[in-house]
Amino acid sequence: MAETLRLKPAAVSAPAVSQVTVLRVVIILTLLASWELLARSGWLYRDVVPSLFAISRAIFDLLSHGEYYFHLAVTAGEIGTALLIGGLAGLAVGILLGANRYLAKAFEPYLYYLGPTPKIIFFPIMIMWFGVGPGSKIALGTLSCFFPVALSAAAGMRGIDKVLIRVGKSFRASTWQMVTKVYLPAMRHPIINGVRLGLGVALIGTLLAETKLSNKGIGFLIINAYSTFDMPRMYAMLIVLFVLSIGANALVGRLGGLDGIKRV
Amino acid sequence: MLTPTKPTSQDATDDAILVVDNIVVRFETPEGPIVAVDDVSLKVKPGEFLSVIGPSGCGKSTLFNVVGGLLGHYNGKVSVAGETIAGPHQSIGMVFQEESTFPWRTVTDNVAFPLELTGMAKAQRIERARHFIALVGLDGFENRYPGELSGGMRQRVSLARTLASEPKILLMDEPFAALDEQTRLLLGDKVLQIQQQLKQTTLLITHNITEAVQMSDRIVVMTYRPGKVKRIVEIDLPRPRTSEIVGSEAFGRYVAQIWADLREEASRGMRDEEKHTLSHPKGGAS
């Protein structure tokens, strides 16, 4: 019954603000203070390190203009589509490789070699195939997130407790029922982890592609701000992007019920 | 009194619901073929509780997989009510030795799993699941996850799940092996009570003599490798039984008799494994 007890809220006796939280706030405040000091010192070339005030104003400017949201929507759409295509393809391939040892032996080494290769080297090909518009960005994002999802799905499939498969078979589940009611739910943790990694690299792939050659999207705006030497605007966009990525990652974790479902 | 019968003279009643006929299973290993199950035949009558007992390595789990339809390559025939099985059969419900609840499903959804596969409507299958949850004494835990339950409770969920598929034959492979002795006895009571209440035909695979004598109408004692039927013992103890029967004199005599048979096999198994370990120091006999 110890397990039942442990499931009760653990933070009852903990203080409202823990020491670690205090430390974290102190770290951030120190960083911000040093930044401001550096900005005002004049040691670096003007505007390379803009003051916090200038950055805050740039963030405000950015968020109060509709133009930014258009580009944000373009990039979000590209990443979302990439994650959808690459994720589903990765999942299908991963399940296939996880289920079939013969196929796994034949194909998995390639996945391991191609997985860590920077996908940006394929960008010229993607431009030739899909044009300079969102198509080539989606393609690069898809390519990026396919590998981590496929590899974690394959490993997850092999990690399924064998007895659960035998239970499904003993109740005469069809192949489709085995996939939807046993394999996928049993693999939910590795799949969610794969999708998180996939989201990360899809984000990188898409944005990187946008900074290389594009006419819309956040990557385009950032590189545009850089080439017009509008540093506060560039930093503003980086900060907003950073916050958005954290949010997206948290959302994927939450959607997958990583915290909701109790583990054995 | 004790009425041991010879394996050859099994009561050949034709009303048997489960017939296991001359099963032979061979496994290829790096050190050559092993005969795991050698010409085993059994008949289980409707409503009967039959146990198969034997030392580790007697092929009883292999037999479990053959009867459950999870093992393909064997010689011989298993038939249910006259129909030869090929693969898992709807009349046979399996309970596994290992932890086998789905951790992502609540108790209710675990028990409703086999009903869900047949496409039963949600309201109906939940109602049915609740009935079987109550039967194994887990009412009040319907919405809990297996991770919140004890090992004994999880094993009861597995039992309820299999019972929910309403199998003609309940097939169990050491379902209490991972539990402590007290839980095992109490759970045995529960199984006995349910079995007697449902008149559930049951085939139990076990290595535990107490468990076998406590529950069975007949006990099949198997030999160490190759696994053959050594003897079939009728357990003539009054029903309904509970775990209290463990203290009775007749019970003690049955246990002593079966142990005498098993001891010979178990020590042969031990010697064999020692020999194996000596000649293959690294491989070891698992």
Image (spheres, coloured by chain):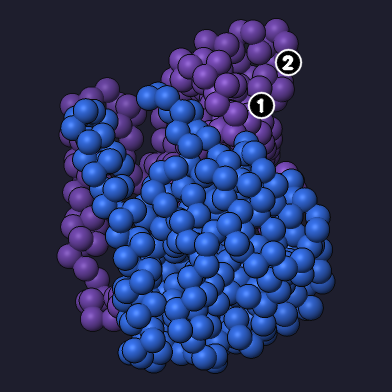
Question: Horizontal and vertical percent for residue B90?
Answer: 75, 60
Instruction: Name chain B's colour.
Output: blue
Comparing A230 with A251, the one in front is A251
| Chain painted in purple in the figure | A
Badge 1 marks a residue whose secondary structure is: helix
Q: Is residue B246 above or below residue B56?
A: below
**For this view, does B106 lie left or right of residue A92?**
left
> Residue shown at 30%/56% (left/top)?
B264
Q: Are marks 2 and 1 on the same chain?
A: yes
**For this view, does A169 lie left or right of residue B277?**
right
> Residue shown at 31%/47% (left/top)?
B269
Mark 2 vs 1: CB contact within 8 A: yes
Residue A138's disc number: 1
Disc 1 packing (10 Å; few <14; some 14–19; many ≥20): many
Badge 2 marks a residue whose secondary structure is: helix
Q: Is residue A65 above or below residue A234?
A: below
Let me know if residue A239 appears in the view: yes
- Give the labeled residue for mark 2: A130
| Mark earlier in primary sequence (2, 1) | 2
